[in-house]
Amino acid sequence: MPEPHDVARREAEATLLLNNDLFVESFTVLKEDLMSRWTQSGSNELEARESIWLAMRLLDRIENHITSIVETGHMNKVLKEQHPFI
């Protein structure tokens, strides 16, 4: 768990990542490539399909984690503004 003073820094860094065109493009290209590989794989290629599915889930988890850092920072700001003595 990050220290309270690190929450704002982490939010700022995560926001920069999510707004970075190259970062967004990388996720988009990777997801499209994985989906293409998955749809083009044969039904008998179970290991390949499972590996692709796992890679797609991992990309989602990474993106969701970075988004949650932004949301946590935002929630922390709102809490401090609305309840400064808590």
Image (cartoon, grey):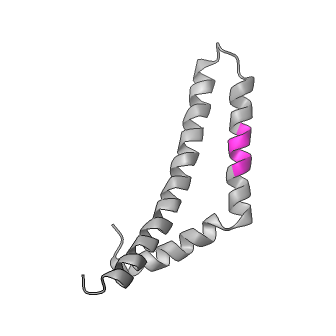
Residue shown at the point (69%, 58%) measured from the top left: 24
Residue 29, given in percent of the width and then of the height, sits at 74, 48
Residue 26, given in percent of the width and then of the height, sits at 71, 54
The outermost residue toward the bottom is 85
Q: Is residue 29 above or below residue 23?
A: above
**Quarter where residue 21 is shown:** bottom right
Q: Is residue 16 magenta?
A: no
**Residue 41 or 75: which is nearer the viewer?**
75
The outermost residue toward the front is 82
Residue shown at the point (68%, 43%) measured from the top left: 31
The part of the chain drawn in magenta is 28-33
As drawn, is 30 to the left or to the right of 66? right
The outermost residue toward the left is 86
On-image quarter of the C terminus: bottom left
**Residue 85 or 35: which is nearer the viewer?**
85
Q: Main secondary structure of the magenta part?
A: helix
**Quarter where residue 34 is shown:** top right
